[in-house]
Amino acid sequence: MSVVKPKHQRLVLLLFAVSALIGAGLLAAYALRNQAAYFYVPSDLVAKPPEPGRAVRLGGMVQKGSIKTRGDGVTIDFLVGDGKVDVPVRFRGITPELFVEGSGVVAEGRMEGTTFVADNLLAKHDEKYVPREMKDMSKAQAAAVVAETK
Amino acid sequence: MIAELGLAMLWIAAALAALQLVAGCLALTPKGGLFMGLVRPVAIAQGVLVAGAFAALIWLFLSTDLSVKLVAGNSHAAKPWIFKLAATWGNHEGSMLMWVTIMSIGGGVVALVEKRLREETLVATLAGQAFVSLGFYAFLLLASNPFQRLPEPAAEGQGLNPLLQDIGLAFHPPTLYVGYVGLSIAFSFAIGALVTRDVGPAFARAMRPWVLGAWIFLTLGITAGSYWAYYTLGWGGWWFWDPVENASLMPWLAATALLHSCSVLASRGALKAWTVMLGVVAFSMSMVGTFLVRSGILTSVHAFAVDPTRGSFILALLAIYIGGALTLFALRANTVTEGARFSFVSREASLVFNNVMLCGILGIVLIGTLYPLLTEAMGVKVSVGPPYFNPVSAFFAIPMFLIMAVGPLLRWRDDKAARITWAVAVPAFLAAAALLGIVIFAPAVSVLSALGLALAPALALASLMPLRGRNLRRTPLPIYGGVLAHLGIAVALFGMASESAFSTEKLAAMNPGDVQQVGPYAITLKGIDPVAGPNWTALEATLAASYEGAAPIILRPQARTFSNPPGNRTESALSTRWNGQLYLVLGEEAADGRWQMRLWWKPFAPLIWYGGVLIALGGLLALVGRVARDVKRLVATDKIAFRRTAQGR
Amino acid sequence: MSAQAPGKPGPKKPGLALWLPLMLFAGFVVLVIYGLSRNANTDVVSAFIGKPLPAFDLPPASDDRPGLATADFTKGKPRLLNVFASWCVPCAVEAPQLAALAAKGVEIDGVAIRDRKQDLAQFLAQNGNPFARIGRDDLSQVQLAIGSSGVPETFVIDGRGVIRYQHIGDIRPEDVPIILRKLAEAGA
C-alpha cells in the first residue's frame, strides 16, 4: 500500500473525521427519537397512551389509600393521579424512603395493558430536591385541584 | 490568624498569576526579551503560594476553627479526622480552591522542569495557564471566599452531607479534579503551541506526561465513582448514564483520544492540528462536565447541592476560554505545517481510526446528555437512559475494539497486512469460537452482551501480542503500559458483559429463619436489629450466605438514617469471590412484619473495576517509563553542559 | 480520496471546516443559557402564591390544641402554616427552627398529615409544641388543596387568608431570616 500524497492526506483525514462525527450525530438523532423516555402525567397517559413496551416516565401523586401490597410482600399496586384521572401502577421492588401516599412520585417503566409497570420509583423530597418534571407537574395539578374545589 | 494568612497568600498568588500573564504576553513581543526570564520564577512562586493557602484551609478544617464560615457550615468537631480533611474539598469554595491549587502547582512544575520546548512556546504556555487560573482566582476571591470569618464563632458545625460521609466519596471528587486540572495543562500547552505556531514532536513530548497523569486520575476517578454508585445506591447497577457520570466519562474519552494522537505526534510528527484540537476538546469536556454538575441544569440521581448563579460563572469562564481557544484554532490551524505522511495500513492509520471512534462515542454521550435540555426548549420532557446509550455507543465501541486488537501490531508509516496475519488470526478465531459457543449454549443472552463476552477474551489475547518476540527484559515500560491498559479494557469488558448477561436477582419478603436461593448461594435471614453509629442509626439485617453448601459467611446490610443533617442511605453488603459477587440490600418492613430483601448474584462483576484499575496501572507504567527517560536525558544534557563549561570551551 | 476533484482549491474547504467546532460550541452555549434562565424561573414557585386558602375546617389533632379552619387565618395578622407529621424525620429536625420562630412572636398553626393521636403527642412532647392550633388531615385533603406535595412544608399566610410564600422541605437555620422577612412583607 502506498503512502498517501501529502496534499491529500489532510483532506482524507478531515473528511473521515467529519463524516464519522456527522454519522454519530445522525445515529444519535435517530436513536433518541426512538429511545428517549417521554414524561407523562396521568391524563396524557390515558388520552394518548404510548405504544406498549416503550419506556416512559409517569409523574403524579400517589393516591391516598391506594397502596396495596401483594402476598409476596414485595410487589405493590397503587394509583397515580393528577386530579383528573388515576392510573394503576404496579411496582416490584424496594420503595424509596419518601414514597408515601399523598406525595409526588416519578415512575419509570412501561404500559402493559391499562397498567403502568414501573421498574423504578423516584420520590425525593430531601435536600430540597424536587424532580425537575414535578415542578411543573404540581402546578398543572394544582390548577386542576383549584378548579375542583371552586 | 491562619485564615487571614491563607487569604493573603491567595491574593498574592492571584496577583502573581496576573503578572505571569502580562509578562508572558510582553515577552512574546519583538522587544520583550527582558520579560522572558521573569515568567518561570513567577509561575513557581505562584504555585508555592497557592499550595500554602490550601494548606491553611486544611489546617482550619482539621482544627475545626468554627469562626470560619466554611468550616462551621461543612464540618463538625465530632467527625473523624479523615472526614474533616475530606470536608475541606467537600464543598463549593474548598473544591474551587483545590482546583486552583492543583492548576497552579501544575504550572509551577512545568516552569521548573520543562526544558525541551522552545522558550517562546513555554512562555506562551505559562501565560495561557495563568489566563485560565485567573478566572478561577476571580471566582474564588470575589464570589466564593473560602476564608471568610463569621461575625461570631458558631457553637457547633453543621456537619457534612451523609452521602459524603463515605471514604470512597471523600476521595473520589479530588481524584477527578486532578484529572480535570491535568487536562488544563494540556490545554495550556495547546494554546502555547498555537500562539507560537510550534506544533511539533517537542510539544507532544512535553504535553504527554500531563495528559497521561490526568488520564490515570480520570480512570481511577471513574472506576471509584462507579463502584461507589454500585454499593451505595443499592440498585445493583454500576453505571446509570446519569449526567454526573457522563460528565466524568466525556473528558476521559477525549483524554484517551488525546493520549493516542499525542504518541503519533511525538513519534512521527503527524496529526498536528488534530492533536491541538483534542487538547482543547479534552479540557472543554472537563469544564462542561463541571458546569453540568454544578449548575443543576440537568437532574441527576446524585443529588448534589447546586446553584444556578455559580453555574453562570462557570459558563462565562467556559465561554471565554473555550470560545477563545477555538477561535485561535480556527485562525491558526491552517498555518500549522502538514504532518508526516502514512499509509492506510500503518499504526498511525489505526490510531486515527480509534481516535475518530472515541470522538464518535464522545459525541453520542454529549448529545444524549444534552438532549433533554434541547427537547425541553421545545416544550417536551424526556429522559435519556441506557436504551439509548448502550447500543449507540456500542456501534462505535465494537469497531474500535477490533482495531484496538490490530493497531499495536502495525509498524509506523507503512506496513503489510500479511505480516501480522497470524497475530490477528488467532484472537479472531478465539472470538468466533466464543461467539458460536454463546449462541449454542446461552442463546438467551442479548446481542451486546454476547459480543462483549466473545470479544473480551480475544481482545485480552491480542493485547498481549505486542510482547511476542520481544526480549521482555529490554522492552521499554511504555510498551508494557500499553499492553496492560488494553488488557484492562478487555477485563472490564468481560465483567460488564458477564454482569449484564448472567446476573440473577431475587426480591423477596423474608421472616427470620427463611431461606432464599440466589445463584449458587443459599441465604438465611437470621434477624433484624437496630444499631447505632457515631452520627447515624440503622436497621441491620444479619444474613448467613452459604456458597453451594459451604460453611456460611455472615453479611450485614443496613438501612441507615443520619441525624445531622438528616438523610437516609442504604448500606449494601457485598461478598466477593473470584468468580463473582453477592450483593444484598435491606428494604422495608412489609405490612405483615416480613422484611423486604433484594439479593443479587453477579458473576465476574468485580472484573469491571479490576479492569479499571489495570487500565490506570498501565497508564502509570507508561508515565514512569516516560518520566524516567526524560530525567535520564535531562541529567545527561546537564552533564555535557557541565563538562563543556569545566573544559572552559 | 478519489472523491477530491483535481480542480478544487484544496485549502479553502478545511478553512471553513476549522470554524465548525466554534460554531458547535456556540450552539452549546446558547442551549445552556436557555436552560439556566429557565431553571431560575421555575425554582419551585407555587401556583398558589397570591391565592386565598381554600375553605376547610379540620378537627383538632391533639387534646390540648384546637382544630384549624380557614377562618383562623383571616384575623388581620400574618401566620405560618406548617404541614408536618410525627412520622417524618425532617419535621423533627426543623423543630428548633420552628421554636425559634415561635420565640420571636410568630404565630404558627400546624396541619398533621395522616397521624395518630398518641404518636403526635409523643412527637410534640419530644420536639416541643410551637403550634397555636393543630388541624388533623387524615386524608391529605388540605395538604393537596394548598399545593403541598410532601412534609414538611411551611406556608406564610397573610392576615386576609392569602398564601404569600411556600417553603418546601425542612426549615434550616439559614431559612429562618427568609421566613421572617416574608412574614414582615405579608404584614405590610
Image (tube, helix red, strand yellow):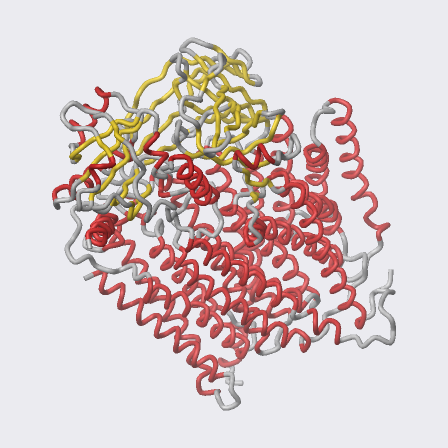
Residue B341 percent across, percent down from the top left: 77, 67
Pick whichever, B160 or B316, lies toward us.
B316
Picture quadrant of residue C156: top left
Q: Residue at x 63, y 54 (%)?
A: B363
Any part of residue B209 in sight: no
Residue B381's place in the image compared with B411, above or below, is above
Residue that sits furthest to the front in the current view: A150
Residue B520's place in the image compared with B326, above or below, is above
Picture quadrant of residue C137: top left
Residue C13's place in the image compared with B84, above or below, is below
Residue B92 percent across, percent down from the top left: 36, 54
Q: Residue at x 42, y 68 (%)?
A: B135
Pick whichever, C123 or C164, lies toward us.
C164
Any part of residue B192 in sight: yes
Quarter that holds the N terminus of chain A:
bottom right
Left or right position of B153 against B639: left
Residue that sits furthest to the top in the current view: B513
Picture quadrant of residue B5: bottom left
Quarter that holds the C terminus of chain A:
top left
Left or right position of C179 against A64: left
Pick whichever, B155 or B349, lies toward us.
B155
Residue B255's place in the image compared with B125, above or below, is above
Pick whichever, B645 or C151, lies toward us.
C151
Residue A31 percent across, percent down from the top left: 68, 45
Q: Residue at x 51, y 83 (%)?
A: B28
Residue B452 percent across, percent down from the top left: 69, 36
Q: How many marks?
A: 0
